[in-house]
Image (cartoon, helix red, strand yellow):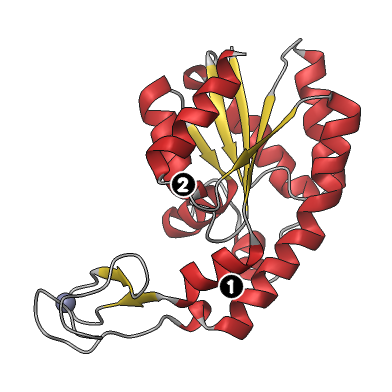
Amino acid sequence: MKAIVLFGSPGSGKGTQAKLLTECLGLPHVSTGEMLREGIRQGAGVDAAVAAIMHAGSLVSDQVVEAMVEERLGRPDAAKGFVLDGYPRTLAQARHLAGWLEGRGIREVVIHLAVDYNIIIARLTGRRECPRCGTSYNVAFHPPKVDELCDLDGEKLAIREDDREAVIRQRLDAYEGQTRPVLEYLRTARGRVVEVDASNDPPESVYRKIRQALEN
Ligand SMILES: [Zn+2]
């Protein structure tokens, strides 16, 4: 049983690591954000009230998310393990999850992709996207051949609204404030949080560190 709980701030590459983990280990990726969006698209699983809350940009209540995750983890494809992503997000959710795992004798591994604040700012503010074909660039790490123009169609590259520096700082601060107490709880109550430095290394070497932590 591999119960993996993945934490990572915006820009930590968490999405990439979640994908690698689920593909290589053959485990389902249980992402609460995706489940809520999916539920809204299909109009199933998540009721209209939740959809309305999501559209209003508010947080969905603990009980709703807890029930949704529990239902998901109870499905057959999660019997051998799962990669939890975006959950638990609050202390109440963390306590709930701990109780759920405890009741089944499952010992989870919590992976925290730790990143350096300034490196993340540089990485995220350097992101550019082609408005025509959607190709992604980064002025620092993966620049286009011609400054600010798409390699494929020559379109002027754009910055996504949520990649602007003030917005990024807000997102990082919000993540810190929200996540720190949850990680502290998991560290003290459950005793297993693995810190993986994800500031600088390419995704493959971050992934190697995670796999190493899982073997131990
Ligand atoms: Zn393009």
> Mark 1 is on which residue type?
His
Query: Around disc 2, counting alpha carbons within 10 Å, would you say few (fewer than 14), some (14 to 19), or many (20 or more)?
Result: few
Relative to 36, 192 lies left or right:
right
Does residue 202 sit above or below 61 in this rendering? above
The quarter of the rendering in which ligand 1 is drawn is bottom left
Give the percent coordinates (x, y) of residue 111.
Answer: 64, 35
Between tags 1 and 2, which lies in front?
2
Query: Around disc 1, counting alpha carbons within 10 Å, would you say few (fewer than 14), some (14 to 19), or many (20 or more)?
Result: few
Residue denoted by label 2? 201
Does residue 115 sit above or below 52 in this rendering? above
Tell me what residue is drawn at x 62 percent, y 67 percent. Answer: 54
Is disc 2's CB within 8 Å of ligand 1?
no
Tell me what residue is drawn at x 80 percent, y 42 percent. Answer: 183
Which label belongs to residue 55?
1
Q: Nearer the viewer, residue 158 or 99?
A: 158
Residue 26 visible in the picture: no
Which label belongs to residue 12?
none
Q: Quadrant of the C terminus?
A: top right
Relative to 27, 142 lies left or right:
left
Give the percent coordinates (x, y) of residue 166.
Answer: 63, 84
Tell me what residue is drawn at x 42 percent, y 21 percent. Answer: 25
